[in-house]
Image (cartoon, helix red, strand yellow):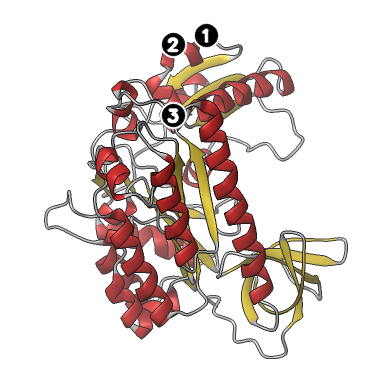
Amino acid sequence: MDALAGELRDGFDLAGEGERADLVVVNTCAITADAESAARQAIRRVAREHPGARIVAAGCCAAVRPETLAGLPGVAAVVGPRAQAGVARVVSELCGARPAASAPGGAPGWSDGAARPARHTRPFLKVQDGCDHGCAFCVVPLARGPSRSLPPEDALRRLAALGARHAEVVLTGVHLGGYGRDLAPRASLEGLVREAARRGLVGRLRLSSVEPGELPLALLRDPEARRLLCEHFHLPVQSGSARVLCAMGRPGGDRALRRAVEEVWAHAPGACLGTDLVAGFPGETEADHRETVALVESLPLAYLHVFPFSARPGTAAARMAGAVPAAAVKARVRELRAVSERRWRAYLAAQIGRDLDVVAERVAGGFARGTAGRYVGVRWPSSGETRGQLVRVRIVAVEGEECLGVRARVFASRLPP
């Protein structure tokens, strides 16, 4: 959405918080039934808050539920990720403006908003879309199609444009670890990060989510690349049971997670590590669940993203027998989320006494707030910080879900001049 907002800056005024908009783009998700429900609720809320506005429904839910979204109040267009006309072009046509042009050298369907200022202090750069894995529970390949990657030089150019204005950029993709496999000549996530580090394109780079077996472990042994990367790695495994992983179409995921975690911990001890888990996959027994609990308890994971299984139409899992009773699914989700809460509190407490580099995202009321390279939220008494500035903060306490700190005396800025 950062890139889309950047494209629309030419010829459009982006509404600020609390301002009435004439046109609203709602980016939707379809990964679970709850996500689809949230998408519909978001569109209805936009219609109430911006009466008369034309709404463009985009994203995965727009691909798998176009008729449903098209029938909601205020929706003027539904644009799935695989549509020939991108969201910016549809918005332009709805408003009678000149359609946004494709970037020179860019791949069809890729937005080039990175060439313009981003809305966020830690902007996202999407370098890959689609997925070839075909996990049994996942609707993403149906919605977004096969894996497609931005050519390396194009990705590096966009990263340089963002890095010139922002201390941190978040590298994203639907299947980020598969970056470059579809290109000729073939490229890789490892190669992209190494080149970004060699050219000094950005102060720090955060990887959004990488399959455990696809994390480029060689980067952790490269001092230049390790200095660039945030000490935060999200490694989705989905289950700790080998039997369930095989049924999901993800064999070996538990072993890959162990290896990735051990390698990260060896080269970046104290890094923030997280994973995704699905509870209640068809056929999952209590013994399978206990294996999952045992896996996460045996690893230094800081948090878990836990989802109850949701049957997605068109996926293999939706046709599987062995549905787990709803009460059992809720109990398993509750237990895993309790583990996550305990782990996160412990991880926050472990930051006390450490100096963390934090991107200031909000400065108000005498305090600054931001996100550290280790992913924790930090608040400290402001002393002239500006939004987007990289600040070194010494953590002195934890309050709720936030670390409290003070400005550290020594700080070497990595912001570009």
Query: Residue 104: where, in percent of width, then height?
Result: 29, 48
Decide: is 98 above or below 253.
Answer: above
Amino acid type, callout 2: Glu
**Pointer 1: what residue?**
71
Foreground pick, 88 / 63: 63
Q: How far across and down, in percent of the image, does residue 400 sit?
A: 77, 60
Asked if the residue at tag 2 contacts the one at tag 1, i.e. Cβ–Cβ closer than 8 Å, the answer is: yes
Residue placed under numbered mark 2 in the picture? 67
Circle 1 Cα neighbour tier, 10 Å, few/some/many (<14 / 14–19 / ≥20) = few
The image quadrant that residue 195 belongs to is bottom left
Residue 97 visible from this viewpoint? no
Residue 373 in the image, given as x and y percentages of width and height: 55, 70
Q: CA distance from mark 2 to mark 3?
A: 30 Å
- Pointer 3 local density, CA inside 10 Å: few below 14, some 14–19, many at least 20: some
Residue lying at the far top in this picture: please name it: 71
* Left or right: 299 as drawn, with respect to 404: left
Find numbered disc 2 in the image and state the secondary structure of the residue it sits on.
helix
Q: Earlier in the sequence, mark 3 or mark 1?
A: 1
Name the residue rendered at 16%, 51% in the picture. Answer: 183
Cα distance in 3D space between marks 3 and 1: 33 Å
Please report the residue visible at 44 percent of the width from the left and 29 percent of the height from the top: 324
Q: Is residue 86 visible?
A: yes
Check disc 3 and give the amino acid type: Val
Residue at the extreme right of the image, as rendered? 365
Q: CA distance from mark 1 to mark 2?
A: 6 Å
Residue 352: x, y in percent?
Answer: 70, 79
Q: Badges 2 and 3: C-beta atoms under 8 Å apart?
A: no
Name of the residue lying farthest toward the bottom: 410
Tell me which corner region of the image, top left, top right, bottom left or bottom right, holds residue 403: bottom right
Mark 2 or mark 3: name the one nearer the start of the chain. Answer: 2
Mark drawn on residue 324: 3
